[in-house]
Image (spheres, helix red, strand yellow):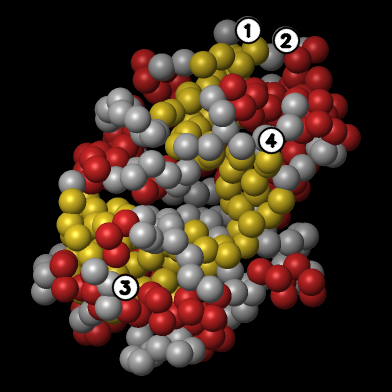
Amino acid sequence: MFDLCAKTPQALLPTDIIFQTPYWAQVKSRLGYKPLAFDLESRRRGDVLVLLQPRGQKKIAVVPQGPEYAPDEENYGPFLEEFSLSLAEKLGPDVACIRYDLPWKSLYADEMKKREWTAFPEPRIREMRMNMGTRHWNIRKSPTDLTVASSLVVDLDENEEAIMSRMKAKTRYNIGLAQRKGVTVRAVSADNLPEFYALYGQTAQRNGFSPCSYENFAALFKCRFAGKGNAELVFLLASHGADNLAGAIIGISGKAANFLYGASSNLKRNLMAPYLMHWTAMNLARTRGCLTYEMGAVSPGLDPAHPFHGMYRFKTGFGGRIELRSGSWDFPLNQDAYRSFCNAEHLDRSRLAPRMRAGGPS
């Protein structure tokens, strides 16, 4: 069992994972979650942020991209089981499930790359492997991943010339084209959020997904960033003349920059504004000491049938590497309530299923 010691979320240790910071605890608190924080084994294994999310008469305990510490791959399951049982004692009887969004390397990452698989194995197979060595065989693959399990990461540990040399020729050309055509990218403030949200609405309609509410974005800018090792946001708008063409919200924590949200206009798409916007974001991240720029969702491999194939084509043009992670996993504490949650989530997915298409940049 783990020795977990409760503490205030503002005392969370510095980390490269923005979703495990005091800042993220503040953001989610504004959106109805209750943040909790715990030290693990007298800090030898760091700490963890847990977010309690109300679900009817019960709650789900969400661990966003945590725990950060990853055991050896053969111990993933036993580690999660022991950690879950220890955490459950701290959460109370109204928590029906613990949901982890694991940042750990996927157990199938090496095999997927070697065999050039373009999808993860089916959940049943993944559950069997994750539960090997556990006592209760109670770890379940979540119906969906809270954050993406396959993400494009660009390394920023070299100079601009070296970073650009790793890009595909078409990407370099499109960055230059946007510059030659007069696209400009500027850092803006929360006052410009309505302009970004207008672009975001166009993006959602064009790509057929259900948009987040304005309040979700506003919460990002209403929280304090002060404090050593805390997170910060970079908010960019790309424009041509009087027209806003693209926008990005990038979170920075430690040595990592994370592309949280993006949007683009239906206008002047031939000017390739998103290319210049990401290149600008990478350079700004470098000036803040970041060693990586995470662009987010892509298909695990080259698969035209995958809903993220368009993002794969766009983002892999910037060079970088695809990280294949474990994704989201559930540890049910109340089996009846957990089944009800899963049934409700299935209905929600059926009702709000995004009409994804294999398009280009957002």
Look at label 4 and name its amino acid. Answer: Asp
Q: Which mark is residue 157?
A: 4
Look at label 1 and name its amino acid. Answer: Gly
Q: Is residue 68 above or below residue 272?
A: below
Q: Report if the CB atoms under discs 4 and 1 are less than 8 Å apart.
A: no
Q: Which of marks 4 and 2 is nearer the N terminus?
A: 4
Quadrant of res 266: top right
Q: In this view, does 185 lie above or below 204?
A: above
Quadrant of res 63: bottom left
- For residue 58, say whether it is visible: no
Q: Earlier in the sequence, mark 3 or mark 4?
A: 3
Query: Residue at the top extreme?
Result: 241
Q: Mark 1 against mark 3, which lies toward the viewer?
A: 3
Which residue is tagged 3?
83
Q: In which quarter of the image is the C terminus?
A: top right
Q: Measure the alpha-carbon separation of dots 3 and 2.
A: 54 Å
Q: Earlier in the sequence, mark 4 or mark 1?
A: 4
Q: Is 312 or 27 nearer to us in this picture?
A: 27
User: Which residue occupies 71% across, 51% down?
Assistant: 321
Q: Mark 4 against mark 2, which lies toward the viewer?
A: 4
- On screen, residue 86 versus residue 199, left or right, reads left
Q: Which secondary structure, mark 2?
A: loop
Q: Which secondary structure, mark 4?
A: loop
Q: Residue 317 carries which label?
A: none
Which residue is tagged 1?
241
Q: Residue 182 carries which label?
A: 2
Q: Measure the alpha-carbon separation of dots 4 and 2.
A: 29 Å
